[in-house]
Image: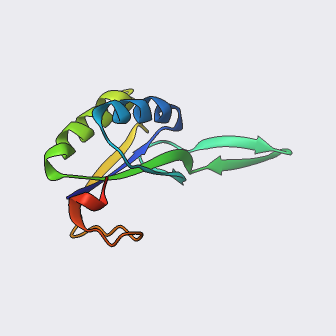
Amino acid sequence: MKKVEAIIRPEAFQTLRQNLDQLGVKGLTVSEVAGCGQQKGQEGIFRGSRFQVKLYPKVKVEMVAEDTEVQSIVDLIIDTCATNEVGDGKIFVSTIDEVFRIRTGETGKSALV
């Protein structure tokens, strides 16, 4: 099993969610996050004082899937979220050793659905 974490632009989330649902992805964890990468800082003015904005709002979408499903998920995220502009985000894929469903004690693939 693999964990797929995508950090994306907030405006891309609803479309991504619909597309993941159509692909058959059942479970997601979604968090509002802030971060920076290659994006340049923006300058703002508040009550006459200039300040630098270094963090940008993003959405973090996490899901665990079977190894065979990961490439389809990654391709879908790229196809849905790419604008070809700096700040589109990142996708991280990591190995999951085990999954446990707290309510029933199920493990492995049966704990995912």
- x, y (%) of residue 6? 37, 47
| Quadrant of the rendered image containing residue 47 | top right
Q: Is residue 76 above or below residue 49?
A: above
At 40% from the left edge and 37% from the top edge, which residue is drawn?
88
Residue 20 in sight here? yes
Q: Is residue 76 above or below residue 43?
A: above
Quarter of the image containing the N terminus?
bottom left
- x, y (%) of residue 28? 41, 49
In this picture, residue 83 sits left or right of residue 97: right
| Quadrant of the rendered image containing residue 109 | bottom left
Of 14 and 34, nearer the camera is 14
Residue 94 in sight here? no
In this picture, residue 98 sits left or right of residue 59: left
At 26% from the left edge and 40% from the top edge, which residue is drawn?
73
Of 43 and 69, nearer the camera is 69
Q: Is residue 26 above or below residue 11?
A: below
Q: Which residue of the protein is positioned furthest toward the left in this rendering?
A: 68
- x, y (%) of residue 83? 39, 26
